[in-house]
Image: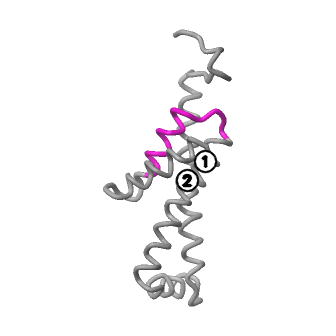
Amino acid sequence: MIQLILIVVLGLLAQLVLPWWSVAIVTFLVCLWRSQSAGQAFTYSFYGVALVWLGYALFIYAQAGGDFIGRMGELLFKVNNASLPTLATAILGGLVGGLSGLSGFYIRQASGSRIAPDATSRTRL
């Protein structure tokens, strides 16, 4: 759960000053550092980035009065519905984050850094 909170908070901060792909770097680094399994890395990264992008899409929806996202829904999906572009944004962001987090886990696994099952069984390097 700490990993999910880290991804959301650091992803929000990164999105304020860096390009859209900065969340991929954030999830990569967090999963490189904290993930214990591939499934956990993908799931937490997917949900973390999806929450960030969903929140941002809802913020834009509230600021623009729904006109902008409704028009994007009409342009992309041929319906005047704001929920489809918002859902597509969250899913796309989640996939970017999930695959980046999975890459971070696999890089750590390939480099030979093993994860200790608990704090008592850690060995000195």
Up-down relation of residue 31 to residue 81 (above or below): above
Residue displayed at 55% across by 82% down: 82
Q: Which residue is mark 2?
A: 48
Q: Which residues are magenta?
A: 23-38
Relative to 86, say whether 50 is above or below.
above
Q: Are marks 1 and 2 in contact (CB under 8 Å)?
A: yes
The location of residue 69, given as percent across then percent down, is 48, 82
SS class of the residue under badge 2? helix
Circle count: 2
According to the image, label 1 marks what residue? 44
Residue 102 part of the magenta-drawn span: no
Q: Is residue 106 above or below residue 101?
A: above
Prevalent SS, magenta region? helix
Amino acid type for the residue under numbered disc 2: Gly
The amino acid on which the numbered mark 1 sits, given as a three-letter code, is Tyr
At horizontal 59% and vertical 71% (from top left) the residue drawn is 87
Q: Position of residue 124 (x, y in %)?
A: 54, 9
Q: Is residue 25 magenta?
A: yes
Instruction: Between residue 13 and residue 108, name the one nearer to us.
Output: 13
